[in-house]
Image (cartoon, rainbow, N blue to C red):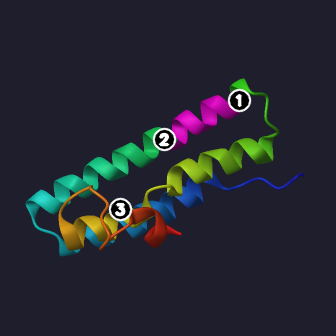
Amino acid sequence: MDIELDRKEIERRCDEYFSIYDEVTGERVYEMCEAKIEHSHIVASNCDHIAHDLDFSRYDTDLAWLIGELHDFGRFGQIIVTQTFRDSDVWNHAHVGA
């Protein structure tokens, strides 16, 4: 495939999405969201490195990076509602993120 993802644009849009939580949270929740933002960027970078090491195509490497970047989107609402990272019967971040 010759399709390339615009990582800078995706990062910009993710940061725009994340900034919503800057505006509506108290200090503790803000710190938890900041930790998840950093975590998501690290996971994306790790996915990128693993894909390179496995000699993935450019498209598949970009896709691996994107999956890493988006993998915890459901956590942000979870933090706002429950103020914890623990999943429960009430909140499953994977289900919400999907």
Q: Is residue 64 above or below residue 10?
A: above
Q: Amino acid at mark 3?
A: Arg
Residue 84 visible to the viewer:
yes
Three-letter residue code for mark 1:
His
Element class at badge 3: helix
At 44% from the left edge and 72% from the top edge, which residue is drawn?
96
Q: CA distance from mark 2 to mark 1?
A: 14 Å
Q: Which mark is residue 43?
A: 2
Residue extending furthest toward the top: 53
Find residue 75 and name its label: 3
**Residue 56, picture quadrant:** top right
Q: Quadrant of residue 21?
A: bottom left
Q: Position of residue 82 (x, y in %)?
A: 20, 68
Q: Position of residue 62 (x, y in %)?
A: 69, 47
Magenta residues (range): 44-52
The label on residue 6 is none
Element at label 1: helix
Question: How many circles with numbers are drawn on the protein?
Answer: 3
**What's the residue type where badge 2 is placed?**
Val
Q: Position of residue 65 (x, y in %)?
A: 61, 45
Label 3 vs 1, first from the N-terminus: 1
Residue position for label 1: 52
Q: Secondary structure at mark 2?
A: helix
Residue at x-position 26% and y-position 52%: 34
Residue 3 located within the stretch drawn in magenta = no
Q: CA distance from mark 3 to mark 1?
A: 27 Å
Residue 91 as seen in the image, left or right of residue 54: left
Residue at 39% over, 64% down: 93
Image coordinates for residue 2, horizontal then vertical, percent: 88, 52
Q: Main secondary structure of the magenta part?
A: helix
